Amino acid sequence: MSADNIFVQSSTEEQIKDLSLYISKLRGEDNESYAQQIDSLYKSDKKDTVYAELAKDASVFLTENDKEVEGAFNLLVVLILGAPEAVRSNAVTTLVDTLTKTESNKIGLKQKILLNLYNALPGNSPLRYNAFVGLIEATAQADELESLYGQLEYVDAWSKQWGIDEQTQRNLYKYLSQVLSKAGEEKLALEFSLKELKTCDEKELAKEIVLRAIAMENYFAFEDLLQYKGIQQLKGTEEYELLDVFLNGNLATYQSFAQTHASLIKDADRNLYKMRLLSLASLGSENLSRELSYADIASNLQIEQDDVEMWVIDVIRAGLVEAKLDQLNKTVIVHRSIYRVFGPEQWKKLSTALSAWKENLNEILAVVGNAKLTAGGALQGGASTAVIVEGEAAK
């Protein structure tokens, strides 16, 4: 069968011959030496190595222009998935490496073949992990990673379905975090680093996560980090102390820490900015529905009064508070503010507030009840008057 006619239903041996002849053709070999080499290998006691060999040499499909390369790739996928189980894994990983590591502008073709490979593998096959990672890599090369963000929420479920072991799952989380970080998706990258931390409690990883969270713009959920055992194990380290400052401290606390731990501070300006926002949020939570003067805010944040409005607007944009500016009286009324830490003290405040609301509601219900009684008496005509007259007659 000639190399020009390789896409037909045939035996495994014929498919191998067809692919090897096609590779010889793309290489421009007149003597078809590659095809002869593959034929000799297949007839030897190392015949099972042919699948990985073809997967490796299929890189020529990405470097040469020919209308049949997509069909050749698909034939190779079918051939590899039909390979003996003992060599199938190596053949699949070799094909994924070929598709992701070969320099080529055929990014769309890479993605298409990797997706075909992923879908052709059984749903419970651990090899789906390799195809998935390859697809992520090819999509990142195409600068189209955003198109897959919506699918990443299913990674946990997929990894269970694939049946991969814990180390492979950890590798997957680490890889996704690295790729997303490189793409500028720091928050999503941090989520996968936290998933990785759940599987290992690695101390250095926990330290890295703390520093990344602090350095990340618009990340304020520091209390959430405390639920991870790996983070808890950092107690006594300077990284944990820094985290505690962002959880419970104020601007002065941070400045004092920064002076004695200068090597740990990677972005002083951003840290100061975030600390001022958090300090303003704390000030708001302590003074809900009460007027805060510009002077008090300026003193707390160590800024000029002329800059207060800018900081209030920034803290509102960050989603930390809901507030109203009174420019005429130079005051701010905070209607809602986050609690940086919700502990016993915050529960106590919540209990007090709920008790007060309950009392107010009881008073309102009493007023409404009396109003209903009065209205009901009026609807009965002179009945209410008769009662009053009887009362007066009794006197």
Image (cartoon, rainbow, N blue to C red):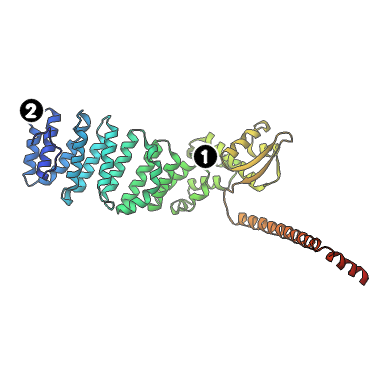
Mark 1, Cα crowd under 10 Å, few <14 / some 14-19 / many 20+, is some
**Residue type pointed to by label 1:** Asn
Label 2 with label 1: CB-CB less than 8 Å: no
Please indicate whether residue 225 sits to the left or right of residue 337 in the image: left
Question: What x and y, as percent, mark residue 312?
Answer: 63, 37
Please indicate whether residue 116 sits to the left or right of residue 51 in the image: right
Q: Furthest residue to the front?
A: 381
- Asked which secondary structure carries label 2, the reply is loop
**Res 148 → quadrant:** top left
Residue visible at 40% across and 49% down? Answer: 195
Q: Give above or below for 258 relative to 125.
A: above
Question: What x and y, as percent, mark residue 113?
Answer: 25, 39
Earlier-in-chain disc, 2 versus 1: 2
Mark 2, Cα crowd under 10 Å, few <14 / some 14-19 / many 20+, is few
| Quadrant location, the N terminus | top left
**Res 57 → quadrant:** top left
Mark 2 highlights which residue? 30
**Residue type pointed to by label 2:** Asp
Residue visible at 73% across and 33% down? Answer: 328
Q: Which mark is residue 218?
A: 1
Kindly tell me whether residue 164 is visible in this rendering: no
Q: Which mark is residue 175?
A: none
Please indicate whether residue 11 sits to the left or right of residue 275 in the image: left
- Asked which secondary structure carries label 1, the reply is loop
Question: What x and y, as percent, mark residue 284?
Answer: 64, 44
Residue visible at 67% across and 31% down? Answer: 306
Using the image as rendered, state which of residue 366 and residue 158 is in the foreground.
Answer: 366
Using the image as rendered, state which of residue 318 and residue 281 is in the foreground.
Answer: 318
**Res 361 → quadrant:** bottom right
